[in-house]
Image (cartoon, grey):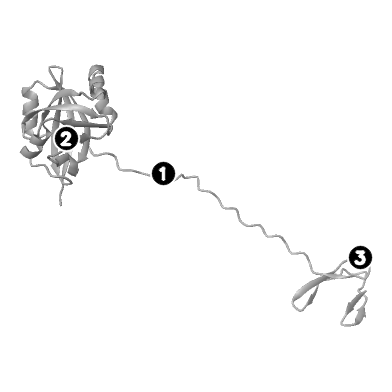
Amino acid sequence: MITLFGVKMQPNQNEEVKIIRLFGVEMAPNKKEEGMKMEPPKEQETKRPERRRSAIKKTRTSSPPLPPAPLPSPLLQTIHDMEGKDQVFITRKILEWSDTDAGQNRFFIPKNEVLWEVLSEEERRQVEGGGGVEVMVVDPKGGKHDMRLKKWVSLNMIVLNSGWRKLVEGNDLKAELDCVELWSFRADSKLCFALNVKRQVQ
């Protein structure tokens, strides 16, 4: 029995009870309980579409390091005259203000494994001990400069000093403009360095 607006209605039991829409809401009789109570039909559960994760992994790309520039003829000629061999590219850096400061008189070499590998065990001990190793540095014009490769223990920095200021002044090096490329080589087993300079476009 269904009561609707105070009027009792008996559905035909031989027919399937259909859903009744009331005020925009669909109602269906519950056959399991007496009195045929009206219940709203159960809403169908809707499944959210699963998000597919892309199989392609995003990777960060970085530009490969630029190859060193060709060494100028005067520098190559000096290395040849010294019978230099075992040339190894060490590093490059843009000169900082402290590298061209006459008061500091030193060139800071960024830490890298290549430099450490070209040193002999004895040279490593001397550099680590703070006393340093006497080296020859050839500038872009082919000039030769006696310097010392050592470690500033207090700052944990590897530097070339004891003659660096003369090289800076003789080649008119400028901080934040000149990019220095440092090479190592051996001349009669003596550790030497070659310095190439490229000025940046302002």
Marks 2 and 1, Cα distance to the nearest angstrom? 40 Å
Q: Which mark is residue 33?
A: 3
Q: State the quadrant of the N terminus.
A: bottom right
Quadrant assignment, res 115: top left
Marks 3 and 1, Cα distance to the nearest angstrom? 63 Å
Give yes or no for contact between labels 3 and 1 (Cβ–Cβ under 8 Å). no
Decide if residue 95 is in sight here.
no
Q: Amino acid at mark 1?
A: Thr
Tell me the residue at 6%/27% (across/down): 78
Quadrant assignment, res 27: bottom right
| Disc nearer the start of the sequence (3/1) | 3
Residue at the farthest bottom position: 6
Q: Is residue 44 above or below residue 99?
A: below
Marks 2 and 3, Cα distance to the nearest angstrom? 97 Å
Residue 116 lies, in percent from the top left, at: 26, 25
Residue wearing tag 1: 59
Residue 129 lies, in percent from the top left, at: 25, 22
| Disc nearer the start of the sequence (2/1) | 1
Q: Secondary structure at mark 1?
A: loop
Tell me the residue at 9%/20% (across/down): 83
Which residue is more in the foreground, 30 or 64? Answer: 64
Q: Amino acid at mark 3?
A: Glu
Q: Which mark is residue 106?
A: 2
Q: Residues within 10 Å of mark 1 (few under 14, many from 20)?
A: few
